[in-house]
Image (cartoon, helix red, strand yellow):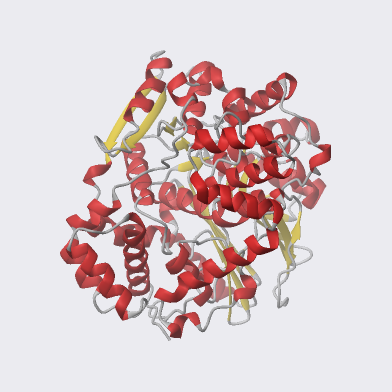
Amino acid sequence: MCGIACYLGNNKDDGLKFGTKSWAQLWHRGPDDKGIYNEDNITLAHTRLSILELSELGHQPMNSSCGRYVIIYNGEIYNHLELRKKYLGNHCFKGHSDTETLIELFCIQKEKMLSDMVGMWAIIIWDKESKKIFISRDRFGQKPLYIRQMNKSWLFSSEIKPLLNENEHNTYDPTALVEYLALGNYGHLGVHTFFNNINQFPEGCYAWLSSDQKNIDSKKYWVLPNIDEKDKIPFNKTVQKALHDCIVEAVLSQTLSDVPIGITLSGGIDSSIIAGILATYYDKGINIFTAQSLESKYDETKYANDVIKMNNNNNFIVHRNNLNELSIKDNLEKYIKIQEEPFGDPSIIAHGFLMNMAASAGVKVILNGQGADELFFGYNNMAQAILSKQLKSLQLNKFYQNLSIMKLGNRYLFRSILESFLPGLEYNLRTKSRISRRNIINNSIINQVDDSIISLHNYNNIYNVWMESIYGVHIPHLVHYDDRNGMSCSIEGRMPFLDHRIAECVANIKTTDFLKNGLRKYILRESCKQYIPKSVYNRTDKIGFYTPLVNALKKDKNWVFAKLKDNTLYKNEHTKELLDKMNMDKLNVNEALHIWRCLSVIIWMNEYKIKLN
């Protein structure tokens, strides 16, 4: 895991300045080594976090053995040793880094190599002969790559800070800002960021680029599989075993490391499965990092303890943190700097606490359970889509049983009926609801919104629900905060469930089988039930990484009042209503989130010298 930066232009001195500046601003991403390659048209800068091949044989930028190509790379390719055997059996390697595998594989395969790669990556390769760079990013966008055009040059970086100039007044993207303030959505606008002049290279894509090109023509090398429902297969014992084997392979492949690994454990199904698989097959010590809101109704300590007790084979080294100690006043500004953009809620700060714990324990690689909810239809809106599918196909017993056990109520019954039989009306109502929730925001910001860049899918097609979660409202911000929090502590975060082989396996299973007996992610529970205690298997609640937001705001009330009272983001009457309710201790969670989002934007604008138009 590393930090990368690239200048592509026509001024060698400008390139060197950018590369040197990037070193300093990306040092936390790779404190073990640094390197730079500087020619007339190109500068490649790299900071290295040594995970594989700890010696200088892993140094970057790295030249190909043929001398034509130079690579900088951030990520891990978990199957790189298999790729060596398959394609490079006659090559004499100097070391065992995946970087060396990639550059030599690129020499013979170019972009064709991407389809065989299992892992996460952001790659830039300079072709000395054609004077072009090759760019690629992994299938789910786990590893970031930001882009800015400036002074007839192209700038790329693992983070946003190197792309900003000191004392520059930056501008915001109004659509991103409004979507966040009104709905809490962010990271769902494709290549767009909160910064008006900075984009991301799209996930699952590659491109070739020369310095004189005005646009990047990216091409997809992988998309989320879309299998027609009639061609999908039921979840039976054969499919269960295939899915089980795929998940175990994904988890164990991500133990590839020359340094100690650990995992985060919430007590939920997903992280518990990771813990159970490692306890069963991994014979080295495993550091477990868990954080809970002790003695609250959302305290998951019992479930985490059940997982630890079930897998008590002396391999677990447990580290704990109490989230009741979280202070927004003391931490929000720090984490806005780390995340570089406004973010969802205090759970991301809590995740940062876990990364700090891991760093203190000397652990440089952390596995987590993120991505399972998205792949296995674990959210309420995804469960609702399955209920609609059951209703439309007249599986009435399954429909009413699931609805009753899940205690979703009349609202979900009504929405399921609409989705099933009046999808156009449901879509229009959802659209109007989204737009009406903007009414709390000042009109001067709303009037700048570009609705054309917002993808609102029709839920009548269940693939759209899946795709929206993977590419829109969930995965993009999950991988963003995991990368930033981990790298701020020089830690590599890994997500075994975001192995594309799992997605391809899951895509072939009948969607209605994902929900059974009121249990979301039923096929995941069944496939991996031997790795989790019954108390976790039978959970029907969905807590997420709960943090006590209302209490935290109350604790820092004077600071919150001072920050919010003169804000020009919300309309005056809405700000007054929020502060009055806070003063009377009558805030609900939704209102607390409005305060949180406003605070996040105010601090972000101050940190990055952004003013409202």
**Quarter occupied by residue 341:** bottom left
- Judged left or right of residue 155, residue 135 is right
Q: Is residue 510 above or below residue 31?
A: above
Task: Answer yes or no: is residue 64 visible.
Answer: no
* Residue 45 location (% of width, % of height): 54, 59
Residue at the spot x=57%, y=27% of the render? 525
- Judged left or right of residue 172, residue 83 is right
**How many marks do you count on the picture?**
0
* Residue 587 location (% of width, % of height): 27, 59
- Judged left or right of residue 315, residue 219 is right
Q: Residue placed farthest to the top in the image?
A: 313
Q: Is residue 451 above or below residue 82?
A: below
* Residue 150 location (% of width, % of height): 57, 79
Q: Is residue 543 above or below residue 327?
A: above
Task: Answer yes or no: is residue 459 visible.
Answer: yes
* Residue 49 location (% of width, % of height): 48, 45
Q: Is residue 446 above or below residue 520?
A: below
Quadrant of the drawing holding the C terminus: bottom left
**Quarter occupied by residue 89:** top right
Residue at the spot x=34%, y=46% of the render? 350
Residue nearest the viewer, comparing 550 with 173: 550
